[in-house]
């Protein structure tokens, strides 16, 4: 089971900030999750809400705070960190740069290990690579422009055909559009408690590679975990009993706001060996300055949802 940092280590650092993702990497997350929205001038930014109000320390002037009605420059004027450790809105381009840097360093580490281990360690570097889960937020005023902009950014980052990139969404339309643009990217359909897991139209078009469900739904219906597609994505587990339950159920990817402690609980439940020092420091708080220094309608009623 892979531990996915939901908006980074978002209960320890401000969500969707570089500091949150840096801390998630230090905590040993296996992957990173982000939400994306399109600005008025066509830039993809990592923000969950329709407006900037909840995460902005200072409220936007001369604006109603709606992300799609603001330019990137306007958003950059706002502090989405803390008064003590300010942070600017993170673009998807910046997050993908961070993601590539992390994976490059892990490949280098894996190659060093392989050289020391000999032929038996061949391929170790590739297995160390982390995953990224990018959620498109719908409905929005720009519709398919979001998917086209996402494809452009993935191409620019040389990730358009990476097996470590996953598109996730509550919107079947988003998955359909992106498959038409780029069928190589793995697609995960997120489902609410009141929605059935399978959409016959989507199944016929082979749009969905895997399914996602909440912890609450999974605990009520554990029989559906691993039943559809090539894996199950579960969100959001922050308690020890939730993480241990997910590990026992064979969940493929588990989203959490506390990647360090989730990793420890997973490893404990599955009996995985880890260096004792890593166990002791996995959730030890670090100064924020340390972490921020590095720099077709196939939709059933109610399917489109702007949360998650």
Image (tube, rainbow, N blue to C red):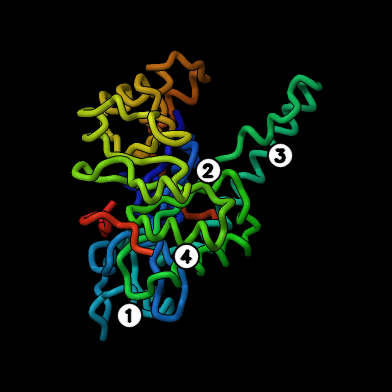
Residues under numbered marks 3 and 2 in contact, where contact means CB atoms less than 8 Å apart: no
Quadrant holding the N terminus: top left
Residue in view at x 27 percent, y 77 percent: 60
Residue at 49 percent of width and 26 percent of height: 278
Please say if 262 is above or below 134: above
List x then y, in percent, for residue 194.
19, 44
Q: Residue at x 55, y 40 (%)?
A: 130
Relative to residue 183, is residue 171 drawn left or right?
left
Is 39 or 284 nearer to us in this picture? 39
Helix, strand or loop status at disc 1: helix
- Image disc number at residue 131: 2
Q: Earlier in the sequence, mark 4 or mark 2?
A: 2
Q: Which mark is residue 69?
A: 1
Taking the image as shown, residue 172 lies to the left or right of residue 21, namely left
Q: Nearer the viewer, mark 3 or mark 4?
A: 4
Please identify, in this view, whether the residue under mark 3 or under mark 2 is nearer the observer. Answer: 2
- Of label 2 and label 1, which has the lower sequence position? 1
Which residue in the structure is indicated by mark 3? 108
Query: Which residue lies at the image location 61% right of the left edge and 48% below the top edge?
Result: 162
User: On residue 147, which mark appears?
Assistant: 4
From the viewer's perspective, tell me whether residue 277 is left or right of residue 194.
right
| Residue situated furthest bottom in the rendering | 62
- How far separated are the C-alphas under marks 4 and 2? 19 Å
- Relative side of 57 to 3, left or right: left
Secondary element at image label 4:
helix
Tell me the quarter of the picture where residue 86 sits: bottom left
- Does the rendering let one see residue 290? no
Secondary structure beneath label 2: strand
**Distance between the alpha carbons at the discs numbered 3 and 4:** 32 Å
* Circle nearer the N terminus (3, 4): 3
């Amino acid at each position: 089971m892979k531990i996915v940092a939901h908006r980074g280590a978002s209960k320890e650092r401000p969500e969707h900030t570089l500091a949150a993702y840096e801390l998630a990497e230090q905590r040993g997350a296996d992957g990173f999750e982000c939400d994306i929205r399109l600005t008025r001038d066509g830039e993809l930014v990592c923000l969950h809400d329709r407006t900037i109000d909840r995460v902005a320390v200072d409220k936007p002037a001369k604006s109603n705070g709606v992300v799609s009605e603001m330019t990137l420059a306007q958003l950059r004027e706002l502090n989405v960190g803390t008064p003590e450790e300010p942070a600017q809105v993170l673009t998807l381009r910046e997050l993908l740069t961070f993601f590539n840097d992390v994976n490059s360093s892990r490949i280098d580490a894996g190659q060093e290990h392989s050289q020391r281990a000999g032929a038996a360690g061949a391929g170790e570097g590739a297995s160390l690579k982390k995953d990224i889960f990018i959620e498109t937020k719908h409905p929005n005023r720009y519709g398919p422009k979001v998917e086209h902009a996402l494809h452009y950014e993935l191409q620019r980052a040389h990730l358009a055909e990476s097996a470590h990139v996953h598109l996730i969404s509550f919107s079947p339309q988003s998955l359909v559009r992106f498959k038409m643009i780029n069928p190589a990217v793995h697609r995960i359909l997120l489902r609410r408690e009141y929605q059935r897991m399978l959409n016959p139209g989507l199944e016929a078009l082979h749009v969905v590679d895997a399914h996602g469900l909440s912890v609450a739904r999974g605990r009520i219906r554990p029989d559906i975990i691993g039943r559809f597609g090539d894996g199950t994505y579960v969100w959001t587990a922050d308690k020890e009993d939730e993480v241990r339950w997910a590990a026992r159920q064979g969940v493929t990817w588990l989203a959490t706001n506390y990647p360090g402690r989730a990793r420890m609980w997973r490893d404990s439940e599955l009996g995985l060996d880890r260096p004792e020092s890593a166990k002791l420091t996995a959730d030890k708080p670090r100064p924020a300055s340390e972490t921020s220094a590095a720099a077709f309608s196939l939709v059933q009623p109610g399917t489109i949802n702007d949360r998650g």
